[in-house]
Structures are given as structure tokens and as C-alpha cells.
Image: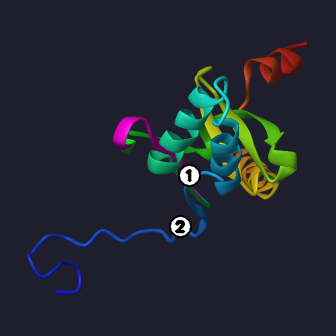
């Protein structure tokens, strides 16, 4: 009975997926925006930081990036590294945290705001993207096909 669970359903083997980061946005973002919220101009930024602190969660593993957010954390997005075409990032909080935009192969964009340790996270994602692109050597883009025929 090694191939089935206690209730008779088959057990599907899972591939180990080490987690690089799992958690919410940077605490410094919340603190900075709460202080800025003491001014009339900063109130919307403080509200945004509170909503992010309550419901935004990142999970970055060796196989995928998962972001859950939105109102009550109901919006969930998962992206595998082979779907990412480009990574753009901007430091915030004197480099303690940052914002990232993942540009996907179909042109869609996934924004990740207030990512803690974003320089480490950026290099980790770039390493995974490079590993996934080198794992599929037979794939060519449109530009590669034009160069090959010229």
C-alpha cells in the first residue's frame, strides 16, 4: 500500500521546492509611510502601506514566485521562472527594500512592492531565470530565428 494514502487515494510524489523567502512586505515601508501619514499629503500612502502590511504576502521558491494580495489577500498570482522575460527593480528606503516588476513573456507585468532584501532577491530571481533559460537550449525567440536565416 505504498502507492496510496490512508483514504485510498494515490499519493503523488512532490518535487522538493526550497523556499528562498516567504513573508510580507518590508517593515520599514510601513514605518516610513506611517510617519509620512502624519501629514495630510501622506495619508493615502499610509493607508496603502497598512493594506500591504496586512494582506500582501510573497513566496519565492526555487521553482516559482507566488504573490497574494489585494483586498483580504484574495488575489493570488503564481509565475514560474521560464515565464519571466525581464526583471526591473527600484530601491526604496535607502536600499533596505525595493519594488520589482516582473515582465512576462506575454507582456503582462507583475508588480512586487516593498520587497525586503530586494537586492538578494533580485539576484536570486536572475539566477533562476538564467538557469531556466539554459535548461531549454532548443528554444529560440523571433530575433534568434532571424539571425540564423540571415
Residue 17: mark in rendering: 2
Residue 16 location in percent, x, y? 51, 71
Which residue is denoted by mark 1 in the rendering? 64
Q: Are marks 1 and 2 in contact (CB under 8 Å)?
A: yes
Q: CA distance from mark 1 to mark 2?
A: 9 Å
Residue at the spot 40% in from the left edge and 69% down from the top edge: 14
Image coordinates of residue 145 in percent, x first then y, are 78, 20
Quarter of the image with the C terminus in it: top right
Residue drawn at (45%, 41%), measured in percent from left and top?
69
| Residue lying at 81% horizontally and 54% vertically, measured from the top left | 96
Image position, residue 34 (x, y; %): 63, 43
- In terms of image quadrants, where is residue 105? top right
* Above or below, 29 relative to 102: below
Place residue 18 in its image quadrant. Answer: bottom right
**CA neighbours of label 1 inside 10 A, class few (<14), some (14 to 19), many (20+):** some
Q: Position of residue 88 (x, y in %)?
A: 78, 33
Q: Is residue 22 visible?
A: yes
Q: Where, quadrant-wise, is the N terminus in this rendering? A: bottom left
Q: Residue at x 48, y 40 (%)?
A: 51
Dominant secondary structure of the magenta stretch? strand
Q: Which residues are magenta?
A: 63-72
**Sequence-first disc among 1 and 2:** 2
Residue 138 appearing in the image: no
Amino acid at each position: 500500500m505504498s502507492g496510496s494514502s490512508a483514504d485510498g487515494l494515490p499519493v503523488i510524489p512532490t518535487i522538493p521546492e526550497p523556499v528562498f523567502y516567504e513573508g510580507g512586505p518590508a517593515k520599514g515601508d510601513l514605518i516610513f509611510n506611517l510617519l509620512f501619514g502624519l501629514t495630510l499629503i501622506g495619508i493615502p500612502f499610509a493607508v496603502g502601506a497598512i493594506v500591504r502590511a496586512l494582506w500582501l504576502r510573497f513566496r519565492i521558491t526555487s521553482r516559482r514566485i507566488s504573490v497574494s494580495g489585494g483586498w483580504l489577500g484574495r488575489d493570488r498570482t503564481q509565475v514560474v521562472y521560464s515565464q519571466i522575460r525581464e526583471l526591473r527593480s527600484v530601491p526604496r528606503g535607502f536600499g533596505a527594500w525595493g519594488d520589482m516588476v516582473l515582465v512576462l513573456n506575454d507582456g503582462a507585468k507583475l508588480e512586487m512592492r516593498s520587497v525586503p532584501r530586494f537586492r538578494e532577491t533580485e539576484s536570486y530571481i536572475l539566477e533562476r531565470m538564467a538557469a531556466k533559460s539554459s535548461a531549454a537550449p532548443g528554444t529560440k525567440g523571433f530575433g534568434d530565428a532571424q539571425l540564423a536565416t540571415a
